[in-house]
Image (spheres, grey):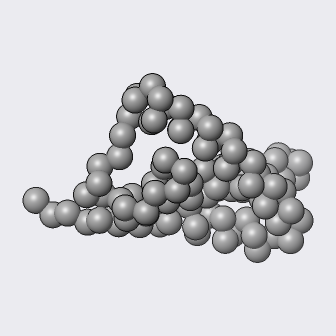
């Protein structure tokens, strides 16, 4: 079986970063995306910390992550909060712009 220690990180970056870069290329989105990315940290952090470390609802396969843990969660999970929030906001802003043009 093929094991890739950075599987979660790589898949996260491949899916989110191109969309975020496109969003950041629009100057009018930059401030919103920064705020949304920052808001993802406390919201996602509290949610996941409780789910993983108190309620034990899920865990992370050590063979699929970097092994860097911050405040009880893997690095990839902290990046997930920021990057998926920014990606979702980018898509929402783009759709809203398209609807306004119609």
Nearest the eye: 52 or 14: 52
Rendered residue at 58%/69% (across/down): 18
**Residue that extends furthest to the left in the rendered view of this protein:** 1
Q: Quadrant of the N terminus?
A: bottom left
Question: Could you tell me how many numbered marks the image carries?
Answer: 0
State whether residue 82 appears in this view. Answer: yes
Q: Position of residue 12 (x, y in %)?
A: 47, 59
Q: Residue at x 73, y 65 (%)?
A: 23
- The quarter holding residue 83 reads bottom right
Q: Position of residue 33 (x, y in %)?
A: 77, 59
Q: Is residue 95 left or right of residue 59?
A: right
Q: Position of residue 80 (x, y in %)?
A: 55, 53
Q: What percent of the width, then of the height, locates residue 71?
A: 54, 50
Tell me: 20 left or right of 32.
left
Q: Is residue 59 left or right of residue 85?
A: left
Does any portion of residue 11 appear in the rendered image? no
Which residue is pictured at 53% across the width and 38% down the height?
A: 49
- Write the residue at 62% across / 42% down: 44
In the displayed structure image, the side of residue 86 where residue 63 appears, left or right: left
Q: Is 37 rendered above or below residue 23?
A: above
Comparing 50 with 85, the one in front is 50
Eyeballing the image, is 22 above or below 62? below
Q: Nearer the viewer, residue 91 or 39?
A: 39
Q: Residue furthest bottom?
A: 25
Kindly give the residue lying farthest to the top in the view shown: 55
């Amino acid at each position: 079986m093929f094991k890739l220690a950075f599987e979660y990180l790589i898949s996260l970056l491949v899916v989110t970063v191109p969309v975020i870069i496109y969003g950041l290329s629009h100057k009018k989105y930059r401030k919103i995306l920064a705020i949304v990315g920052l808001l993802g940290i406390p919201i996602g952090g509290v949610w996941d910390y409780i789910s993983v470390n108190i309620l034990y609802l899920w865990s992370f396969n050590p063979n699929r992550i970097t092994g860097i843990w911050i405040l009880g969660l893997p690095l990839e999970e902290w990046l997930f909060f920021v990057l998926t929030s920014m990606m979702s906001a980018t898509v929402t802003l783009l759709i809203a712009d398209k609807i306004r043009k119609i």
